[in-house]
Amino acid sequence: MMNHVTIQCADLNASIKFYEEVVGLKIMGDLRGKNPKDIVFMAKNEGETTVELIDSPEAPFKGEGISIGFACDDVEGYREKLAADGLNPTPIIQPNPHVKFFFVKDPDGMNVQFI
């Protein structure tokens, strides 16, 4: 089982807000002020794979070559909401009749997929 995915963040608070408000994650572990760098672990539910956000304004993730995906009940409706919120989602991609998805960028340029 995968434990976590790490993202080096230019602005930890902006990333926390994105993953709370856009993705629907909650803080599961908060190590701010306990290490040389502030770290926050986020997931939808306790015991699930987490997104580890590390405050790294000196070396944030550059957004190339990787994406993380999250399940979404209403791809079209959620894409419309995020477009209205100004997040510039990609067009919906449907590689076969059973799969639909789109991407938005997090504050550091990580491709976040909703499928």
Image (spheres, rainbow, N blue to C red):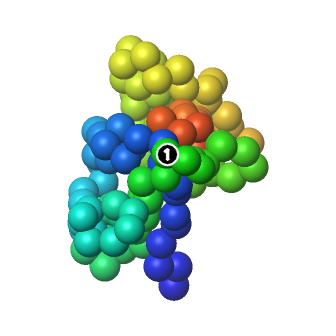
User: Could you say which quadrant of the image residue 44 lies in?
Assistant: bottom left
Instruction: Give the residue at x 67% y 34%.
Output: 93
- Circle 1 residue: 57
Please tell me which residue lies in front, 8 or 80: 8
Indicate the amino acid at tag 1.
Answer: Pro
Number of marks present in the image shown:
1
Q: Where is residue 87? Give x, y as percent.
A: 46, 23
Left or right of 84, for residue 75: right
Question: Do we see residue 65 in this rendering?
Answer: yes
Instruction: Give the residue at x 43% y 16%.
Output: 86
Left or right of 23, for residue 88: right
Please tell me which residue lies in front, 58 or 40: 58
Rendered position, 24 above or below 86 = below
Q: Secondary structure at mark 1?
A: loop
Q: Where is residue 65? Give x, y as percent.
A: 75, 49
Instruction: Give the residue at x 34% y 71%.
Output: 35
Q: Where is residue 12? Give x, y as percent.
A: 37, 47
Instruction: Give the residue at x 24% y 57%.
Output: 26
Rendered position, 68 above or below 82 = below
Rendered position, 83 above or below 2 = above
Q: Where is residue 112? Give x, y as percent.
A: 54, 44
Name the residue furthest bottom.
1
Question: Do we see residue 114 in this rendering?
Answer: no
Q: Tag 1: Cα neighbours inside 10 Å, few (<14), some, or many (≥20)?
A: few
Left or right of 28, for residue 94: right
